[in-house]
Image (spheres, rainbow, N blue to C red):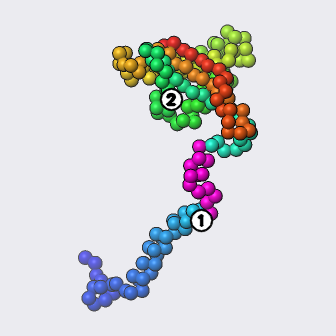
Amino acid sequence: MTVNSSTPGGNDAQPGNDRRLLIRYAAITVAPFVPLMTSFVFVRNLYPFAASTMMMESGDPGRGTTYYILRGETLSGEIVDLPPVVMTNALSQGTWSLVAATVENRNFTNRKPHPANLALIAEAGGPDKIPPAARLNDLLRSWGAIHNSRLAPSSPQYLRAVTLQAFRWSGGGYNNYDQLVQTWRVEL
C-alpha cells in the first residue's frame, strides 16, 4: 500500500504541475510539425510540377541513357508487357540494373565469378573475348519460366517467347527517347 503524504485528502494535483505537463505535451505534439511546415513554406515545386519532376532522373539531362522493355509473346501470338518487378517481387531499379549488368557482361568481371562463368571465360580465351550479353538468354528464359509457372499451360497468357528491347535516349531534350538499339528474343 502506498502512503500519500502530500495532502490530507489524497489529491496531489497541483495547478503548477498540471500546467507544466500541458505545456510539455503541447511542445512534444507541435515540435514534429515545425520542420514539416518549414519545408512546406519553402517548397520549390507546387502541384502538378512536383509530380512530373518526380519521374525524371536527377542530374544532367544532356547525358542520355539506355533503358529496357521486357515483353512476352503468348501462344496465340499476342505481345504482352512483362514487368519483372511483379514476377520477381524485386525493386524496380534493382531489376533493371541486373539487366544492364547482364547485357554489359559485368557478371564476368566479378572478383569471384560463378564456376559456369569461369568455364565460359576459359572457352572464349578471356573475359574481353566473351560475346556481348552472353548470359542474357538465361535471364530471359528464367523470367519466362517464372511467368509461365504461375499459369496453366492452357492459359491465354502462357508465353512461347520472351523479348528484351534496348532503347537509347541520347539526352539534350525530352524527345527522341524511343530509338531502338537492339532486341534479344528467346524461345521458351
Question: What residue does disc 2 label?
Answer: 84
Q: Which residues are magenta?
A: 41-55
Q: How dense is the environment of label 2, judged by Cα within 10 Å: few (below 14), some, or many (20 and up)?
A: many
Determine if the magenta segment contains residue 67.
Answer: no
For the image, the number of numbered tags is 2
Residue 26 visible somewhere in the drawing: yes
The residue positioned 56% from the left and 49% from the top of the image is 51
Residue 143 visible somewhere in the drawing: no
Q: Amino acid at mark 1?
A: Val
The spot of residue 101 in percent (x, y) is 63, 27
The residue positioned 41% from the left and 21% from the top of the image is 157
The residue positioned 48% from the left and 24% from the top of the image is 80
Q: Is residue 54 rendered to the left or right of residue 78?
A: right
Pick whichever, 13 or 137, lies toward us: 137
Q: Is residue 187 rendered to the left or right of residue 108?
A: left
Question: What residue does disc 1 label?
Answer: 41
Pick whichever, 89 or 70, lies toward us: 70
The spot of residue 169 in percent (x, y) is 68, 32
Mark closest to the chain's N terminus, 2 or 1: 1
Query: Which residue occupies the extreme front position in the image?
Result: 175
Query: Which residue occupies the extreme top position in the image?
Result: 123
Of the 4 image quadrants, the one containing the N terminus is bottom left
